[in-house]
Image (cartoon, rainbow, N blue to C red):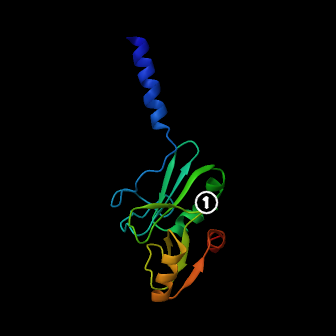
Amino acid sequence: MKRYLSIFALLVFLASCSADPRPIAYGQDGCHHCKMTLMDPKFGAELVTEKGKVFVFDDVNCMLQYMDSEDGKSQMYKHILVIDYLNPGVLLDANYAFYLKSEEFKTPMASQIVAFPDYDLLKEYKNKTGGVYLAWGELTTQFK
């Protein structure tokens, strides 16, 4: 019996070390960078380290500022994720998302940046709101 309890404890430990993303708990999670409670499911970002530690952020600029910090640079990330503006609460791979910066977007920390899953949706929104298209590489230099 003792052996089975040890195996069970090991399985629970391994499951708790999962390096998978988790849904952001709006109204409960606080931004790791600015400490504000995440409230609007159209905005947010998440980092998951190789070891499974999850960091959530209320705005993409908070995530980028953390990634550029000494603590952020010391981490190895398995997932870098941003919220899909058109599908609130849905996380997208930040490296492959398409970003639009426009004064029309009232983001939590005033980055004015939202993410889309594909370029055609971004173009459609850009025609309505104006703004500037940014690729991930350009976006990472905006908040250094």
Q: How many marks?
A: 1
Q: Residue at x 43, y 24 (%)?
A: 9
Q: How far across and how far down the image is residue 116, in percent?
A: 49, 71
Mark 1: few, some, or many residues within 10 Å (few <14, many ≥20)?
some
Q: Nearer the viewer, residue 17 or 130?
A: 130
**For residue 50, side relative to residue 104 (left or right):** right
Q: Which residue is mark 1?
A: 67
The single residue placed furthest to the front in the displayed view is 120
Q: How far across and how far down the image is residue 117, in percent?
A: 50, 68
Image quadrant holding the C terminus, namely bottom right
Image quadrant holding the N terminus, namely top left
Q: Nearer the viewer, residue 35 or 18?
A: 18
Q: Residue at x 66, y 69 (%)?
A: 137
- Judged from the image, the secondary structure of the residue bearing numbered disc 1 is helix
The single residue placed furthest to the top in the displayed view is 1
Relative to 83, say whether 21 is above or below: above
Q: Residue at x 40, y 12 (%)?
A: 2
Q: How far across and how far down the image is residue 124, in percent?
A: 48, 82
Q: How far across and how far down the image is residue 94, in percent?
A: 56, 63
Relative to 106, say whether 34 is above or below: above
Relative to 19, say whether 87 is above or below: below
Q: Nearer the viewer, residue 17 or 28?
A: 17
Residue 51 found in image quarter? top right
Q: Residue at x 49, y 88 (%)?
A: 127
Residue 88 found in image quarter? bottom left
Query: In the image, what residue type sits under mark 1?
Result: Met
**For residue 23, side relative to residue 119 (left or right):** left
